[in-house]
Amino acid sequence: FCPPPLDAALGSQVSPEFQWQAARMPPLSRSLLLFGDDPGSVDPAELVNELRLDLSTAEDVRRALGARGDEAVLRSPAVLPPAACEALRNAVSTESQQKADTVDGAPDHQLNLSREELESAIGPEAAAALWSLPASFLGEAADAALTSDVEIFVRRYTPATRPWNPFHTDSSRLTINVALDPPGRYTGGTLLGCFDAQVRPLPRGEGDATTHESTLLHGVSQLTSGARHALVVFLGRARPAAPATELLDDTERLAEASALAGLMADEPFLERCGALLAGAAGPAAAAAKADRLREQY
């Protein structure tokens, strides 16, 4: 199989910043987010491996990958009425910021809102429906702290400004994501989630919401035309990462230590590392840095 040329997949509207990002995107992410390949054709375990997540995050993602159906993602139709969706679309179109996004560092094109500002924009009935979602998803495990500790923003995607969002996890306990566009306003821009042992598309209509834990790996595929808008609400603090001693048993820790010791005894490997670190400083600096690597490990 030969993938299509990257330039053809991106088209002419994608900014140089996102062209650079696309060129460095891992192959499976690229196939799903840029080339629009069938999510069912991708092994989610391989997708997780190629992302090079830190150990704790990777373990959380793999656990979330095993969750089934509504245990992983709660899908709620028509949480926001069309008038509320239109109000949020208009607001982000006129007032959005362009700060560096926490996922990929590119401009975020989003409008941050307080809880009071959101409720004023969408009205009390829509707000009540929105704040009921954590309890619908978690049941008795939900608590008042979730809806009192919130981060809220509206994001706008276009082919020229923010064409996709790479696969990532969130920094909160729960995430609510509400689609704000009626049908036919854009092409592409599919929300993808990794659960039920698969990469799954999550199609939604205007006002439809998805609720999931922050550990669910998800991304948004390339938008090829139109403008896509979404309301995102982060609720609560992420659960603290498990200590490394809980993630590796004794056999695994010994294997890790043995592998690391082998690397530190490999003189050609250390010389190559030192040369890369030293850059143009010369072989003496490379040797000194290799010695420091050996001492540290």
Image (cartoon, rainbow, N blue to C red):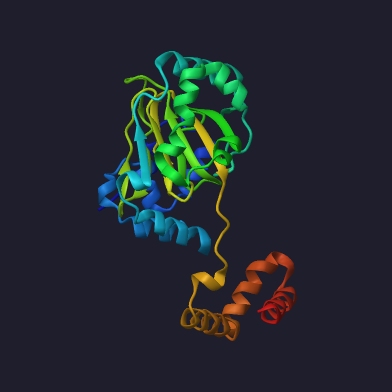
- Judge from the rendering whether residue 68 lies leftward or rightward of residue 88; answer left or right: left
Q: Describe residue 27's horizontal placement relative to residue 125 as left or right.
A: left
Residue depicted at x 60% and y 35%: 148
Q: Residue furthest front?
A: 140
147 is higher (above) or lower (below) than 267: above
Image spot of residue 12 (x, y percent): 43, 30
Which of the two residues, 158 or 174, is positioned nearer the viewer here? 174
In this view of the protein, can residue 4 be seen by the observer? no
Query: Can residue 141 be seen by looking at this rendering?
Result: yes
Check the image and report above or below for 283 versus 185: below
What residue is rendered at 60% in x and 74% in y? Answer: 272
* Residue 252 x/y as whole percent: 47, 79
Q: Nearer the viewer, residue 62 or 226?
A: 62
Count of numbered circles on the image? 0
Q: Nearer the viewer, residue 189 or 85?
A: 85
Quadrant of res 286: bottom right
Residue 163, image x, y percentages: 46, 33
